[in-house]
Amino acid sequence: MRKSVKILFWLLITVNVVLFAVMQTGVLDDGQEAQVLHPVHEEKITLMGSEQAQAASAVTPPLESIQSASAPVPVSAPAAASSVAKAGTCFEWGDFSGADLEQAAKALKKLSLGEKLSQREIDRVIGFWVYIAPLKDKAAVSHKVAQLKERGVTDYFVVQEAGEWLNAISLGLFKSRESAQNFLEGLHKKGVNSAKMGERSSKSRATVFIINGLDEQMSAKLTVLQKEFSGSELKMVSCH
């Protein structure tokens, strides 16, 4: 028994010697380079104190931060472009009466506008006037006329027809708003502060076409059509 133990002991020593020799040469039997193990000198090992450990941890980042930094950052998919429908454009086109009204209606019918087309009637404006609102009676009219003459206003006309404008005093008729406004400002400088400006409408009625929700192509067609009717006005309005 002892002899077997001794043989096993010397056999283990022989194996260790052979392995040590191989490790020193750095070559294995299969020709690959082996990893050289350097001896550890225990006498050179020193333990770090708490302050040194904290300093070392400050220099070397923790493993968790290294892993998170090296982890791939997910890339979010680009948001899908939303198609926003362009709001339709709305117009008013007018005003028309008589033969012009009939021709314009036929031209609009060819555009097949359907429910987008409607119309309304208005009083036709034939100009503007500057006036003094209707007075209570003839005595008040006479008193106002005297004041006008004192301020150098001699061109006037007293409305004597029955109706809402009875006893009003007309001071001037104008084709444009700008001309009427300039005349009114001149009267105010003379001290005629009761004078006003307003539109004069005839008793005839006119028609205005209302076109809602047109796209760019149809708006262009309507613009071209308007040029065929001289004197008509095509204006963009708020959609209802």
Image (cartoon, rainbow, N blue to C red):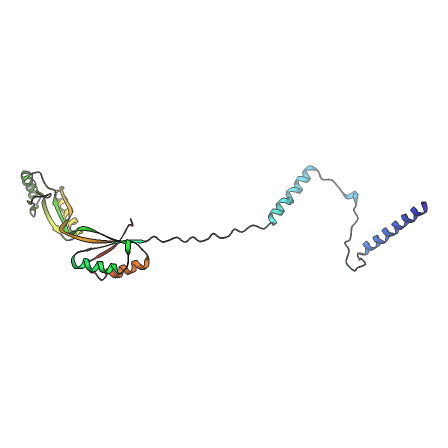
Task: Give whichever of 45, 199 is nearer the camera.
Answer: 199
Q: Nearer the viewer, residue 114 or 187?
A: 114
On screen, residue 52 versus residue 43, left or right, reads left
Q: Quadrant of residue 103?
A: bottom left
In screen coordinates, is 238 left or right of 51?
A: left
Spot occupied by residue 95 in the image (x, y as percentages of width and height): 20, 55
Q: Is residue 112 above or below residue 129?
A: below
Check the image and name the residue furthest to the top.
50
Between 183 and 163, the residue placed more toward the observer is 163
Q: Residue at x 17, y 53 (%)?
A: 206
The residue that appears at 21% across and 53% down in the rendered structure is 208
Residue 102: quarter of image: bottom left
Q: Is residue 50 left or right of residue 125?
A: right
At horizontal 16% and vertical 57% (from top left) the residue drawn is 98
Q: Looking at the figure, which quarter contains the N terminus? A: top right
Q: Residue at x 65, y 42 (%)?
A: 57
In percent of width and height, residue 45 lies at: 76, 43
Q: Camera-side residue: 235 or 22?
A: 235
**Numbered-mark total:** 0
Q: State whether residue 145 appears in this view.
A: yes
Q: Is residue 211 visible?
A: no
Percent coordinates x, y for residue 219 in the rendering: 29, 58
**Residue 96 location, x and y as percent?**
19, 56
